[in-house]
Image: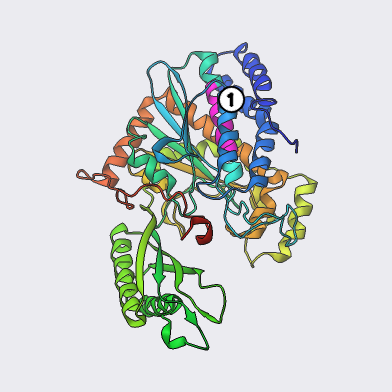
Amino acid sequence: MPARLLPGRLFAPALALAIAAGAAQAQAPSAQRREILAAVDAGTPRMGEVAKRIWTLAEVGYQETQSSALLQGELAAAGFKIQSGVAGMPTAFVASFKNGDGPVIAILAEYDALPGLSQKAEPQRGAAGQDAGHACGHHIFGAASVAAAQAVKAWMTAHDVKGEVRVYGTPAEEGGSGKVYLVRAGLFEDVSATLHWHPSDINSAAQTVSLANVSGKFRFSGVAAHASAAPEKGRSALDGVEVLNVAANYMREHVPAGTRIHYVTTDGGQAPNVVPDSAEVYYYVRHTDPQVVRDVIGRIRKAADGAAMATETKVAFEQTGGVYNMLPNDALGRLMDRNLREVGGVKWDAADTAFAEAMAPQLPATKLTFASAAQVEAYAVGGGGAGSTDVADVSWVTPTAGITTATWVPGTPAHSWQAVAAGGTPMATKAGAVAAKTLALTAADLMRDPKRIARARAELDERRGPDFKYQAMVGDRPPPLDYRHKRTEAGQ
């Protein structure tokens, strides 16, 4: 990996040659599709370099300064107009190429890492030095989305296609709800359709329903004292956290089926012989119904007030995130499935297979085989997913669809060190190329046939109902730019 990556150094010349060669051929749609695929192939080495650099940086939510700047530089070098720091988020951006009036196709890009998951690009557990790691593959997510948009822009220029392609640089997907603030700011109001993708251990265009989610931090404050010499003079903030956690655990029996409640104590004091005067616990609540999520977090807030009363401490709650459930779009999903099948699954070489064989004994038991990396799963719409994503908010305001590609060894769970390890190998670049091709072909299809967009819009209107009005689950709070900071770093 070079110490310094110059925007467009490898991609732009190769892309121009590929498009020029294609433009000299017959102008049939099939020939233009081949141009787009060739353009992505030409840019894949650069895409891999960019992704590996972001993988190495491993910047967490709202702190992705270098990762965001790198992607913006790539887009600017390719002729996109850049708006940086949008919607009150310094690492968010919108990059646009417009060629007259026509459909506006958005492509989402993510680039935040997860704390505590540092890992080398090796099939054995081994931290890489920094704290965070790309355990959800957002490094290749962002790089491949940029590559797709660059290919679409070059195709539009070569054939004078009217319309606009935009890349939305979206920080802090992992709990920070970055896209929510973009939606709330109205930045998707004129978008015709939105496309996205996500790393996985399979190739699929299935359109699933994610879980709505509210996350937030309960901060207890008490009175410090010597835990042995004068414990009666102290009021333990950690006791408040622990009483809240007990109450929440008893609540699990009495919440609607499908509710998920998770928490982690992020500050429990510094020394056992000191009664802690501050403590913090970080909660998530999920369900397919946003109203259930609102109700359950409300009950947990009551439990926190009770815990503070029981321990004679004080408690404050900061909601740090909140997202809707995903609205699937079958019209877009079927189009993406067709294009994913045209592109085909991820093709491994001998080195990829050797890596997978070394990783396999360290993965949970699974029915998947290595062959699944090259296969495309059966299409489906409406099935339930176990996770949450801020892409869901986008799906309530514009027709939205996505795919997954086999970025990891089959059987690898997301948010694991195994995912980080695979993400640092050429396997991830190959998966990103499959995603970029599928996104680019789909964007081109939509620009050439606005009737597809009309069908997708009609489906969105039907799914969300005639009286829907978007109201962010985070309310009117500003983006929580410090939600990944340690309390000592935040001065709290």
Question: Relative to 251, is 191 above or below?
Answer: above
Residue 146 in magenta stretch? yes
Q: Position of residue 101 (x, y in %)?
A: 37, 17
Q: Which residues are magenta?
A: 142-153
Main secondary structure type of the part rendered in magenta = helix
Q: Specify few, some or many for label 1: CA neighbours under 10 Å numbering under 14, 14-19, or 20 or more.
A: many
> Which quadrant of the view contains residue 127?
bottom right
Residue 138 in magenta stretch? no
- Of 5 and 481, nearer the camera is 481
Q: Identity of the amino acid at label 1?
A: Ile
Q: Residue furthest left?
A: 467
Q: Residue at horizontal 31%, vertical 77%?
A: 306
> Which quadrant of the view contains residue 131?
bottom right
Q: Position of residue 225 (x, y in %)?
A: 47, 80
Locate residue 416 relative to residue 3 in the image: left or right: left
Q: Residue at horizontal 65%, vertical 25%?
A: 8
Is residue 26 among what the camera can see? yes
- Of 7 and 10, nearer the camera is 7
Question: Relative to 266, is 161 above or below?
Answer: above
Question: What coloring was used for the rendering?
Answer: rainbow
Q: Which residue is mark 1?
A: 36
Is residue 213 among what the camera can see? no
Q: Position of residue 427 (x, y in %)?
A: 69, 45
Q: Residue at horizontal 55%, vertical 14%?
A: 158
Quadrant in which the N terminus appears: top right
Q: Residue at horizontal 53%, vertical 29%?
A: 149
Question: Relative to 313, is 85 above or below?
Answer: above
